[in-house]
Amino acid sequence: MNQHLSICYMTNRRDCKIQWFMDSLAKQIKPDDRIKIVVINLYPITQPTIPVELEHTKISYHEPKPNVYQGRYRLTKEDWFAAANARNTALCLAPDGYIVFADDLSVLLPGWLDRVKAAMEGGYVACGAYQKVKDLVVENGEVKSFTDFEGGHDNRKQFALSPLHPCGGEWMFGCSCAMSVEALLTIGGWTEFTDGLGSEDYLTGITLQNTGCKFFYDQKMLTYESEELHHVEPAMKRTDKGISPDDKSHRALNIVQSGTKFFDNYVEGGMRTIREKVLKGEPFPNMGQPLSDWYDGQPIKDMKAP
């Protein structure tokens, strides 16, 4: 593996089962892999026991960069969902090369890292597969048992004609996806206008596709997620305003489907500008933007979720 790979573990839970991730990654990593692990956690979490295979891998822990929806600089009265901001935090901390995102409460199945490397060699965006399961038991990074249930199946799988299936950007789900750092920087980063709403993953995917990126859905780049643990802690607040088909989510979709290729994300030059400074050792700026919702102009400080 010639390129550098940043593996970004995203969580907003206090009990995120990060040990599952670390142990399962340790079983797949090779001594000559050039890998950096970036953990983005909204809340302080108990740091895992680092497997011996990862002892020489750089691992860093960070809170999401300052934003108006969550954390110490928020304008909202409570913490809201702001996944694009968190993912852009990881992007700004990643060296050149490839970047892959993995969600919490997940375990990497054998072969996951090999498929990420295949995407790096092929120069495409990899849309990894997932399966939500119940009663998930993981020991030393290996899945020992689980209970299958229909509601946890990846709905993209039924449309895939092969294990590595060419697809569109709308197939990109944030739970497991890989792309070049430069591709994300070219579009300004993950679409932060979705913070407070969600859907940042496939909307960012469509934007990447607008710039010419090629996508493949890889059924062997697979993770299992615990279904029950998603509901232990309160869900992050979010809201989709308006009435379908003219609600906020559809309007956001229309924006990216119109051919949009770049979002400045409230800073001239997008995440490239912030990343250049952060990699030189400067702190993330507190931009305090946006002050109002782009959909209806409501002040962010007055937003309420159902």
Image (spheres, rainbow, N blue to C red):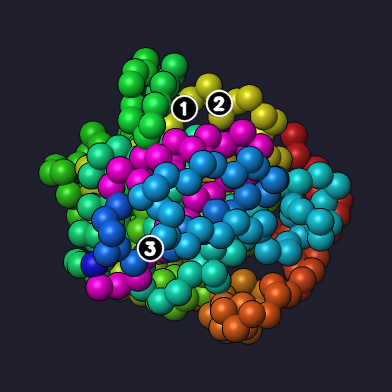
Position of residue 70 relative to residue 124, above or below, is above
Task: Describe the element under mark 1 as helix, strand or loop.
Answer: strand
Query: Pointer 2 and pointer 1: residues touching (CB < 8 Å)?
Result: yes
Nearest the eye: 77 or 302 = 77
For the residue marked with disc 1, what is the amino acid? Ser
Is 198 magenta? The answer is no
Question: Between disc 3 and disc 1, whose residue precedes?
Answer: 3
Residue hosting label 2 = 229
Q: Residue at x 65, y 42 (%)?
A: 45
Residue hosting label 3 = 35
Task: Describe the element under mark 2 as helix, strand or loop.
Answer: helix
For the residue marked with disc 3, what is the amino acid? Ile
Magenta region, residue range: 2-28
Q: Position of residue 27 (x, y in %)?
A: 30, 43
Q: CA distance from mark 3 to mark 2?
A: 28 Å
For the residue marked with disc 2, what is the amino acid? Leu
| 299 left or right, relative to 100 | right
The answer to whether residue 188 is visible is: yes
Question: Between disc 3 and disc 2, whose residue precedes?
Answer: 3
Q: Position of residue 96 (x, y in %)?
A: 41, 76
Q: CA distance from mark 2 to mark 1?
A: 6 Å
User: Which disc, if any, is residue 226?
Assistant: 1
Task: Describe the element under mark 3 as helix, strand or loop.
Answer: strand
| 214 left or right, relative to 209 | left
The N terminus: image quadrant: bottom left
